[in-house]
Image (cartoon, rainbow, N blue to C red):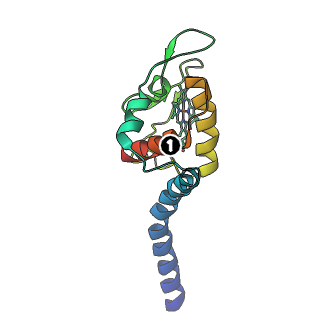
Amino acid sequence: MYIQHLIAIVVGLLAIVALPEARADAVADAQAGYQAQGAGPFDAQAGARRWTENHTEAGTGKQISCASCHRQDLRQPGQHVRTLKPIEPMSPAVNPQRLTDVKKIEKWFLRNCKGTWGRECTAQEKGDFLVYIQSQ
Ligand code: HEC
């Protein structure tokens, strides 16, 4: 009995210790991919600047930026500009689900960069966004 409890406690502790690492890994993995494409070092300030950079949206002619849906303060919940659906905060400090899955990150970078800027983001831009988002 005693040994089993001990094992359960150790396994529980390991899971807690391993969690933040797994989170850091998704960002590290994505960045390794960008670096393989020649990007880096990554700059949080450049990411911050681009976050609020306005672009003219193709269909509507309206000004749009990443902050239009995700807000300038990443700790606040956002709202989709067209569907008006709520969007969970982008800051991983407030929302631990953020930046935990490379596939999800890449899927939304592709969609949102095209939707917001009318083109894909470069590896450098994506890396800058990740360090910026992570710092918030
Ligand atoms: C028209 C609204 C809209 C705009 C503008 C927008 N996004 Fe998003 N974004 C979303 C939605 C919707 C999701 C998916 C739902 C969710 O994750 O909450 C999302 C998810 C993401 C994610 C996934 C993060 C994760 O790990 O959960 C990233 C990264 C992201 N957006 C970055 C950006 C960047 C960078 C820009 C600007 C180039 C941008 N978004 C502009 C609506 C938007």
Residue sitting at 48 percent across and 28 percent down? 66
Residue sitting at 48 percent across and 85 percent down? 6
- Mark 1 secondary-structure assignment: helix
Residue furthest to the top in view is: 61
Residue 11 locus on image (x, y percent): 52, 77
Q: Is residue 31 above or below residue 67?
A: below
Residue 43 placement, left or right of 122: left
Residue furthest to the front in view is: 38
Tag 1 residue: 124
Quarter of the image holding residue 47? top left
Residue 74 appears in the figure: no
Residue 87 locus on image (x, y percent): 52, 31
Disc 1 crowd rating (10 Å Cα; few below 14, some 14-19, many 20+) is many
Residue 110 locus on image (x, y percent): 63, 36
Residue sitting at 46 percent across and 28 percent down? 78
Q: Amino acid at mark 1?
A: Gln
Q: Is residue 98 above or below residue 36?
A: above
In the foreground, 54 or 68: 54
Q: Is residue 75 above or below residue 13?
A: above
Residue 31 locus on image (x, y percent): 52, 53
Residue sitting at 56 percent across and 35 percent down? 121
Rendered-image quarter of ligand 1: top right
Residue 54 placement, left or right of 119: left
Residue 113 appears in the figure: yes
In the foreground, 2 or 117: 117
The C terminus sits in image quarter = top left
